[in-house]
Amino acid sequence: MSGGLRAAIEEYAELVHPGVPVPRVPPAVMPDQLAVMLYDAHLAARLDVQSACAHLARLLADLAPPPGKPSGPPGPRTQ
């Protein structure tokens, strides 16, 4: 799941800091890292809001579970 998110983070980082590796963070921190990279790219005038919104919508659709499949961890086991 985090592959597409990681790719987006690296893509936005490359707009502002070409050639600088992006630190690897745990999956729970990746949304925050993405927010920082988007913010930096937008402030540097390397990314417009409409493009970012469209890309994030595609990313969200890719990360969403298939219809009928619950998201999140499984519930408690019952016997």
Image: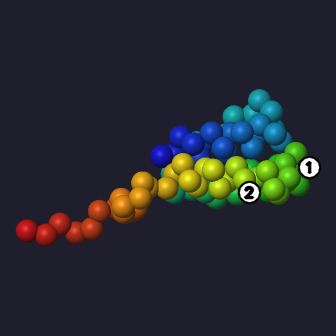
Callout 2: SS? helix
Q: Earlier in the sequence, mark 1 or mark 2?
A: 1
Instruction: Name the residue type under label 2.
Output: Cys
Residue at label 2? 53
Instruction: Please identify, in this view, whether the residue under mark 1 or under mark 2 is nearer the observer.
Output: 2
Residue shown at 8%/68% (left/top)? 79
Residue shown at 83%/42% (left/top)? 16
- Residue 7 lies left or right of residue 40; in this view the side is left
Residue 8 sits in quarter:
top right
Residue shown at 91%/49% (left/top)? 45
Above/below status of 43 relative to 21:
below
From mark 1 to mark 2, how far is it between C-alphas? 15 Å
Above/below status of 73 relative to 54:
below
Q: Position of residue 65 (x, y in %)?
A: 44, 55
Q: Is residue 60 visible?
A: yes
Residue shown at 52%/51% (left/top)? 63
The 10 Å Cα crowd at callout 1, few under 14, some 14 to 19, many 20 or more, is few
Q: Is residue 33 visible?
A: no
- Residue 33 lies left or right of residue 44; in this view the side is left
Tag on residue 45?
A: 1
Callout 1: SS? loop
Q: Position of residue 19 (x, y in %)?
A: 77, 29
Q: Position of residue 66 (x, y in %)?
A: 42, 54
